[in-house]
Amino acid sequence: MDRSCARITAIGTAVPDHDIHAAFQGWAEARLGTREGALFRRMAARSGIDHRWSILPHGTDGGSPVDPGGFYAAGMPGTGARMDFYASAAPALALEAVAALGRRTGLDGITHLVVASCTGFTAPGIDQIIAERLGLDGGIERTLVGFMGCYAAVAALRVAHHIARSQPAARVLVVTVELSSLHLQPADELEALLAMLQFGDGAAAALVTAEGPGLTLDRFFAATLPDSAGLIRWRIGDHGFAMHLSGEVPGRIATALADPGFRAALTAGADPAAVAAWAVHAGGRSILDAVEHGLGLAGGALEGSRSVLRRFGNMSSATLMFVLADLLAAGAEGPGVALAFGPGLAAEGFGFGRAA
C-alpha cells in the first residue's frame, strides 16, 4: 500500500435553496449614484456569476433577506445576532453536505473530524456540534480551522493528509461551511459593494483516507506575496465581519505568478502547460483571469473553477472543495494543482493525481 499520499475518496456539497444574486444587485445599485450605479451594473454583468445562494430568512414574499420579513428587514443586526444564527444554521448546512457525501461513499468508522469555517464563531465549536449531531464517538479527534479565509480548505485537507499518512487506518471527515451572506454591510462605496457581490453560502464534506481510489494529495505548498498584507482583510465589527478586497489583488497575483520561483513552488518545476488539471479557488472572474494569464494557460484550463463561480459565486473556504468535487466526478487524472488565495495576501495549495 502506498502511504506516501492520502486521497480524497469522495466529496459531497450543499447550498441553500434561495438565490440572492439578482436581489443583491438591485439593493446595491440603489445605494449608489447614477454614474457609479451604471458602473456597478456593468461590472456585475462581467462578474462571471449567475447565482449565489443564501441560507438567511428571505421574507414572506419569497424575496431577499432585505425584504419585509427577511433577516435584514429591520436594518443591520449586531454581530451577536449574526453569530446566534450561525450557531444553528452553519451546522445544518454542513450536515447537508455530509449527507451528500454519504450518498457517494460509506461514512462508517470515522476516526477524525476536521472542520474549516471563517464566517462565524461559537462555543461549543461547530466541530463539536457536527460530531454530536452525526452521532460520532465523544472521543473522536477534532480539529477546527478558523478565520483563514478562502484557502482554509487547503489547511483542512493538509491536516487530513498528515493524519492519514501517519495513521493508515484513519478515516478523516473534512467539512468546510461558510455563511458569507450573514455579513452584509451597510456600505455605499463601489469597491465594497463589488466585493460583496462575489460571496454566497455553501458547504462541502470530503472523506480522506490512506488507501483506495480517489484524488491523491501531495506536495502541499504555501507562499506569501510581499507587500500585500492589507489587500484582503476581514474586520470583526459591531455589525458582522467586514470584508476588504482590494482591486489590486488580481494584478498582484499576476505579477507573483510571473516569478519563476513562485511558479516552481506551484508546479514542482513543471511547465504550467503540462499540468493536466487545475483546481483554482473561484475567488472572482478577475482572479481567475489573473491566474490564467499569469501562468500562460490555455483558454478553458480553468473552466472547472469558472463553472463553480458561475453557479455558486465565492463561498470562501468551501469553494475549492466544489471545484475538486467536479474534477473528481469528471474522472480527472492529473497531474493537477489546487490553488487558493486569501488574507495575507497568501497562496496555498497542493498537487493531486488519481489513485486507481
Image (cartoon, grey):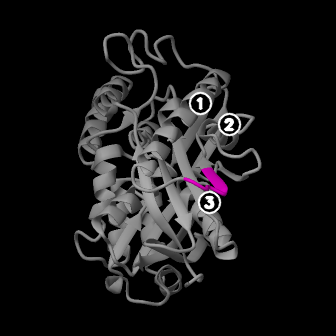
Q: Position of residue 20 (x, y in %)?
A: 34, 30
Q: Which residue is mark 1?
A: 86
Pointer 1 or 2: first along the chain: 1
Spatial separation of the CA atoms under disc 2 and disc 3:
21 Å
- Determine which quarter of the picture holds residue 112: bottom right
User: Compared to 117, does 253 lie above or below?
Assistant: below
User: Compared to 265, does 30 lie above or below?
Assistant: above
Residue 142 visible in image: yes
- Determine which quarter of the picture holds residue 201: top left
Nearest the camera: 128 or 352? 128
Three-letter amino acid code at the position of disc 2: Phe
The reply to whether the C-beta atoms of the residues labelled 1 and 2 are less than 8 Å apart is: yes
The structure residue drawn at horizontal position 55% and vertical position 84%, both measured from the top left corner, is 1
Nearest the camera: 185 or 214? 214
Spatial separation of the CA atoms under disc 1 and disc 2:
8 Å
Neighbor class of circle 1 (other Cα within 10 Å; few <14, some 14-19, many 20+) is many
Q: Is residue 181 left or right of residue 303?
A: right
- Determine which quarter of the picture holds residue 305: bottom left
Q: Position of residue 209 (x, y in %)?
A: 56, 68
Three-letter amino acid code at the position of disc 1: Tyr
- Element at badge 1? helix
Q: Position of residue 329 (x, y in %)?
A: 32, 62
Q: Which residue is mark 2?
A: 121
Spatial separation of the CA atoms under disc 3 and disc 1:
25 Å
Q: Position of residue 124 (x, y in %)?
A: 74, 35
The structure residue drawn at horizontal position 48% and vertical position 18%, both measured from the top left corner, is 72
Q: The C terminus appears in which quarter of the rendering?
A: bottom left
- Element at badge 3? loop
The structure residue drawn at horizontal position 58% and vertical position 69%, both measured from the top left corner, is 225
Q: Which mark is residue 344?
A: 3
Nearest the camera: 58 or 322? 322
Please state the extent of the stretch shown in magenta in the rendering. 108-115
